[in-house]
Amino acid sequence: MRRAYFKNNWVAGLMVAPQLIIIFIFFYFPASQALYWAFTLEQPWGGGNTWVGFDNFRAILTDDLYWSSIWVSIVYAVGATVLAVGMALVLALFVDRRLAGHAITKIGMIWPYAIAAPAVGLAFRFVFSPAAGIMMYVNHVAPGIWNPVQDGAQAMATVIIAGAWKQVAYNFIFFLAGLQSIPRSLIEAGAMDGARVLRRMRDIQLPLLAPTFFFVLVINITDSFTDSFGIVDTMTAGGPSRATNLMVFKIFNDGFQGLDYSGAAAQSIILMLLVVALTFFQFRYIERKVHYT
Amino acid sequence: MANISIKRVRKSYAKTEVVHGVDLEIANGEFIVILGPSGCGKSTLLRMIAGLESVTSGEIAIAGRVVNDLEPHARGCAMVFQNYALYPHMTVAENIGYALKVAGMPKADRAAKVAAVAKSVGLSDYLDRRPGQLSGGQRQRVAMARAIVREPKVFLFDEPLSNLDAKLRVQMRHEIRRIHNQIKATSVFVTHDQQEGMTLADRLVVMNKGVIEQIGTPEQIYHAPASTYVGGFIGSPAMNFLTGQVAARQGAVFLGDGSRIALPADLATAHDAALVQIGLRPEALTLTDPGTGAFDAHFDFVEELGMARLYHFRFEDLTLAVMAADKVQLVPGQAMGVRIDPASVHLFAAATGQRLLPRPMVQTEFAMS
Amino acid sequence: MIERTPILNLVTHLILATGLILMLVPMYLVFVAASHTLNDVTSIPPKLLPGDQLWINLQAAWDKGHLGDRFANSFFVAIGVMLGKIVLACMTAFGLVFFDHRLKMPIFWAIFITLMLPLEVRIVPTYAVAANALLPFQTLLDVTGISWLVNAVSGVQISLEWNLLNTYGGLILPLVATATGTFLYRQFFLTIPEELVEAAKMDGAGPLRFLWDVLIPLSRTNIAALATIMFVYAWNQYLWPLLVITEPSMSMVAVELGRMVPKFTATGGEVAKWNIAMAGTLIVMLPPVVVVIVMQRWFVRGLINTDK
């Protein structure tokens, strides 16, 4: 890629240095610290850490609670992703038809992105609360049917719905942009070829949307592992009985409430590897397969 | 019988009208070229025939059936888009066969038809490629093949050659005409390139600012342009324009500086004392010694065209171009006489730009604006 | 395009209406709850229309959560992150695009990798760093043996400490430490025609002049987009402020929101004052929502360009 350059490289150094320093202090160093802690154990009476090899990892991976946390995280990831991606895709496809009122719908879909995770969590906790509002009425009509305070599955459902609701706006923006980047003449050619609306969605719009779709899919999955803290903390605090004890929440709990830094660090490493693997997967495999131009 | 009938068609977007009442009759099997500059409404007209734009008022009928409310695929038209609009995720074979697939044709029949059409446009070796792997000319042929395979009643072309380089454009022009002669479907071709229009058309429709200026064969349009616009648009190098007033008794038109250009008698008597624009094609003018022609002009510079030269002169604050096959050495500012054959003079009303005819009227097609 | 699909159009409108309702209903319920007394909120049948207690509840929420202070904090942090990101990312992208040196690719990758690990995944160690921001340098000195050397030679024990907990710095700096904005700028800078750089060189402009006089004015829309995203991002921060701030007066709004309702316990615990909490939710939601709606076009554009 031929480019015109400036000659004074020391200026470049000056420009790049601040960000490099910051990411060294706040990213690379903590990441290496995490590695350090994951492989060592803090002495009970201070005096530094001793090397314990993979012991910390072994301890976690044989911990049933950890596996249940992984399982819970996967359930959440799948549930929230399917809901959020599915809904956003359908809505984007039909908003793109540009019928009357689509501009309002568009704004209506986008603004939830601005809402903080704890706000979403609180709002849905209220909506789903068995002791107030709508659900109270449902319990009044069919007593005891709805109680996420006690029922783990129901608690998970509320967390998934809240998480999905928050993600729809983000997905919608990307899908709509992807659809609008398809040249209009392709749609017209399809119409001239005899394909009507639904057929065109199937044969032309969806295949050409595939890169965006996979991108959004992976982002949703990775975000559901990392972004879910605010929602879980305000809605269920990991309960009832750890039914919603997502991995990121467990790390926070173990590290800051339980003061088990080594354990939390080891868990962080595993989570990091998971996220890196997912992102890599998206970049190498998906990007290459799904581009037509 | 796939004739197209366009009656009093208007098109508006919100409050702006872009097509102001167009009437056009296209016979079955004709190759019509709609010619005009950007923004004149020619693409809009084509898209209304296709069903990609709605008709604000007026009527469009194909093969006798009014199609205003019909969806595009129900009209029996196939279209070649300016940027080809090929489906990037489908192979060439799939692109060509898509319409057949939508219509429900079985796979084997489809493959056979696609192969036949691909052969006729020279794409047999490329059936498994994707559009992204093809050159501009090849993509254009895929777009054509896609239209041909549907065996439509009407072919619509929306400036399909604009994105090709000059040499390829000439080649593809011949291809398109050859295919038309073979298939004999009614074709409507839109372009801004007047040379393209002149070489391809059975009849030309010249449009400007949403109205039709003239309809006619290329010959009629070249030799009897209906307005200064048509005269100036068609023909390269472009027509020269001078202003003057007709004097019937002298059988001539007089220019501002008193120079006299002889006119055919019937033309002069028909428009005595009229203020006119005089259209003179460069190839109809000849250079003579100063003082021996209709008037004298001063040499500016010469343009070498290869088979001839275009000499640019200054006259009355205007530039005048004279085409001559033989070489003449001139000095800038040198005066030369310009001789004009009366029969080659085009007269247009100064106010309206409309062509002035000698009486009795010669039958040339006109369009009402 | 002429398309006669009345049934499909009806279905389309139904789908869009349903979507709109699904997205708006939860917030509508929040609004309704925020405008009633606690009794009304927990009454049967549930009240579905707004009441008249809105202003009272808003004030109660403001006082109970000490939202005045928190708002100021959040504003300060959000603007700090926004400005920090805009400036830093611009400088870094500039250094990456308009110069050529061997280290360019490694530096690019070093920055790129930070995209893969959002803050939530590295909270524990990042917290340790916030507790002592000079810890990295201390560790470097220790590990390379320099501090031992200095100690042996001069008897001086090097002990670097800079505590960022409970400070604005601790809130702002870690949020600025990722690559999002850098890639937005980089992508944009790559679309600047080279002729512009060459013309500037011929006019005698050095790189800094070029940056200030040419690049930054051209980047105005990108800057607006990035600013919007960063403001919303920083305002909505929950986990990080939760960890780093123990001093109540330094807290941020999103965290306060979490404190408005008692923690979830299996036995139900204390009864939540839903109407106040919902009013608080509305207050906290307001600034970023206003920003997003007003800056909708830049915001959307920025999202697409940052993450792709």
Image (tube, coloured by chain):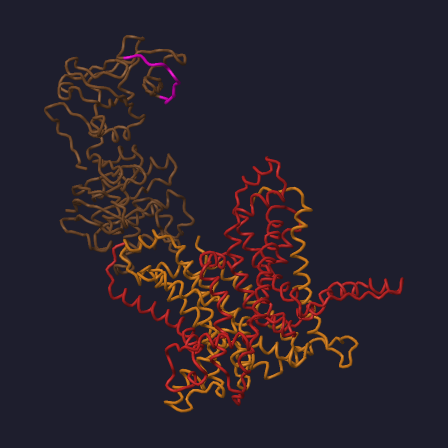
Q: Is residue B8 left or right of residue A159?
A: left
Question: Which residue range is magenta in the image?
Answer: B295-306
Please tell me whether the stretch drawn in magenta is mainly helix, strand or loop: strand
Is residue B300 in view? yes
Residue that appears at 27% across and 42% down: B41
Which chain is assigned brown?
Answer: B
Chain coloured orange in this rendering: A
* Snapshot quadrant of residue A271: bottom right
C218 in the magenta segment: no
Which colour represents chain C? red
Left or right, B250 with reference to C8: left
C107 on left or right of C23: right
Identified at 36% across, 58% down, the residue is: A204
Give the percent coordinates (x, y) of residue C81: 59, 61
The number of discs equals 0
Q: Is residue A274 visible?
A: no
Give residue B333's position: percent from left, percent from top: 39, 13
Q: Is residue B321 above or below residue A18?
A: above
Outermost residue, bottom side? A143
**Observer-nearest residue: A22 or A47?**
A22
Quadrant location of the C terminus of chain B in the rendered image = top left
| Residue drawn where x is 63% and y is 66% of the image | C171
Compared to residue C261, the image places residue A183 above or below, namely: above
